[in-house]
Amino acid sequence: MKAIKLTTAESEAVERAYYEASSFEALMAVLCRQLNADANSETAKVIHHYAELCRAAQMKLKMAQEMVLSRHLDPQTSAGVQYRFDFVREEVVLLEATAN
């Protein structure tokens, strides 16, 4: 495993996006549990609205992660690399490459 030190700005950008995406995932879980019992066209609209926001937050997280990784890794050699962001240490830990 290799750890890459991030700047505070890089770490905070990914951390913000991570918590935003996690919050939308939790909200979707609650909405689906609560609103599916009384499913109708209005509840479907609510679920679809928040599902779109959840997808956007997931894309924002992926983009933030990719932007940070692209600053520190060569895209030619980093394909398939798995990683984990450590916000406390402000680093990204590279795990292992996956088979493509």
Image (spheres, rainbow, N blue to C red):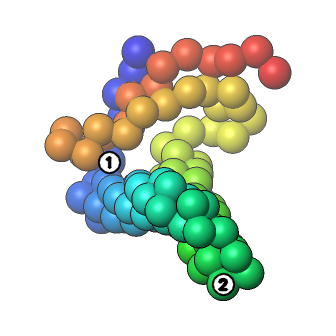
- Residue 86 is left or right of residue 67, and the answer is left
Whole-percent x, y for residue 30 in the image: 44, 59
For the point 63% across and 18% down, the residue is 97
- Closer to the observer: label 1 or label 2? 2
* Residue 52, image quadrant: bottom right
What type is the residue that disc 2 sits on? Glu
Total numbered circles? 2
Q: Earlier in the sequence, mark 1 or mark 2?
A: 1
Is any atom of residue 53 visible in this view? no
- Tell me how far mark 1 sits from mark 2, CA to CA: 44 Å
Percent across and percent down for residue 65 are 51, 51
- For image coordinates 57% across by 61% down, the residue present is 37
The C terminus lies in quadrant: top right
Give the camera-side residue of 47 and 41.
41
Residue nearer the viewer, 35 or 74: 35
Q: Residue pushed farthest left?
A: 88
- Please give left or right for residue 13 compared with residue 96 in the image: left
Could you say which disc has been placed on residue 6 in the image?
1
Q: Secondary structure at mark 1?
A: loop
- For the point 66% across and 69% down, the residue is 39
Q: Circle 2 — which element?
A: helix
Percent of width and height locating residue 2: 40, 21
* Crowd tier of the residue under label 2, counting other residues whose Cα lies within 10 Å: few below 14, some 14–19, many 20 or above: few
The image quarter containing residue 62 is bottom right
Q: Residue furthest right?
A: 100
Looking at the rendered image, the quarter that the N terminus falls into is: top left
Horizontal side of 14 relative to 49 (left or right) equals left
Q: Amino acid at mark 1?
A: Leu
Q: Which mark is residue 55?
A: none
Q: Residues within 10 Å of mark 1 (few under 14, many from 20)?
A: many
Residue picked out by circle 2 = 42
Residue at x 48%, y 62% (from the top left corner): 34
